[in-house]
Image (tube, helix red, strand yellow):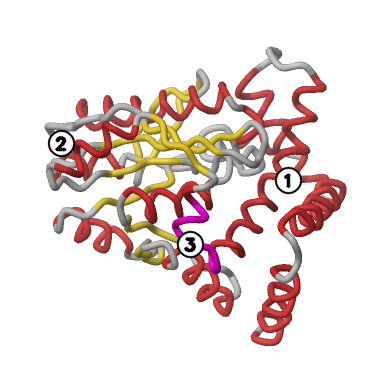
Amino acid sequence: MIVLYRLFLLFDWGIMKLPPKMRKGIFTVLATLAHLLALSRNRIIQNNLAFAFGNTLHKEQKKEIEIYCYRNLLLNFLQTMENRRNNAKELAQRVTFKNRDVVDELLAQGRGIIFVSAHLGNWELGGAALSSLITPVSSIYKGFSNAAFDPYLLEARTNHRMELAEKNGALKHIAKALRNGRSILLMIDQASNARYGVKTTFFGHETYHSSTAAGLSAKFNAPIIGVYITSEDEKHYTISFENPITVENSDESSILNATQQQVNGLEKVIRDHPKLWFWCHKRWKGEFPEIYAG
């Protein structure tokens, strides 16, 4: 496994010697190959789209979204490589912040913020820009099956003032950050269950959604702000902050209401930019496993 990692580092060195346009071209080709080979994953994408949108999307639109899933994933991979070397000035040249004054006002009060986001658009650029240009954040990561690659990901993210905790046992880490007035960033779009979430309505279906952000907000009096990154040309990016969600009580109704508000914000941005979301994961596997049967 160490040998594989060293070969990857050699690939990384060679790729990063190339001009940006050429690097992107290589990863675009890799994305095309991945799409051609991942037939079972393509079915998951199509099943998710049918479940979420019904018949409101044309066949051509669904195929475009399917193809772009791989392109977007590979561009995020490339962004991770670039984030190990770039700096705040370079990030600032690529992003524009929308509704930033809401965040700046809260930070001026010395309050920690619970940022919630998703695997949508160039999320690696979004996370780096948020932590580097707005406020340092603590976040959670899931280690690779080959642990030799973990330091690579950590280096790419900590290069931009982000503190990371491995998923198992990470709750104590992010709770400590909030207790100390620091902000955190949570990715809230993955599948959840009754242990870690509450039932919400997502794309018209009752779906478990993580209630971690709402629970932490109630406990530490920290506002929740959705933050999503989008782009029309893959050159200029907009990072949009949603209005704060406050959770004053930890009762079931308050947690559910705050979580549903997060889901509503997530669904809206996905509907506005459907091809930018990570459709290739089994988002509804817990509640509707039949979607992915066969």
Disc nearest the viewer among 3 and 1:
3
Secondary element under disc 1, as helix, strand or loop, is helix
Specify the quadrant of the image occupied by residue 1.
bottom right
* Residue type beneath disc 3: Asn
**Residue named by callout 1:** 71
- Tell me if label 2 and label 1 are in contact, CB under 8 Å: no
Classify residue 173 by image quadrant: bottom left
Q: Amino acid at mark 2?
A: Ser
Q: Secondary structure at mark 2?
A: loop
Give residue 47's position: percent from left, percent from top: 70, 31
Q: How far across and down, in percent of the image, does residue 14 sit?
A: 75, 74
Dot 3 or dot 1: first in sequence order is: 1
Q: CA distance from mark 3 to mark 2?
A: 40 Å
Residue 241 covered by magenta stretch: no
Q: Nearer the viewer, residue 294 or 254?
A: 254
Q: Which residue is mark 2?
A: 250
**Range covered by the magenta-colored residues:** 84-91
Q: Name above or below for residue 58 compared with residue 163.
A: above
Left or right of 276 on screen, residue 104: left
Q: Is residue 67 left or right of residue 235?
A: right
What kind of residue is marked 1? Arg
In the image, residue 14 above or below residue 242: below
Question: Helix, strand or loop at disc 3?
Answer: loop
Q: Earlier in the sequence, mark 3 or mark 2?
A: 3
Residue matched to label 3: 87
Q: CA distance from mark 3 to mark 1?
A: 24 Å
Q: For the point 66% across and 80% down, which residue is it?
A: 5
Where's the C terminus, which quadrant?
top right
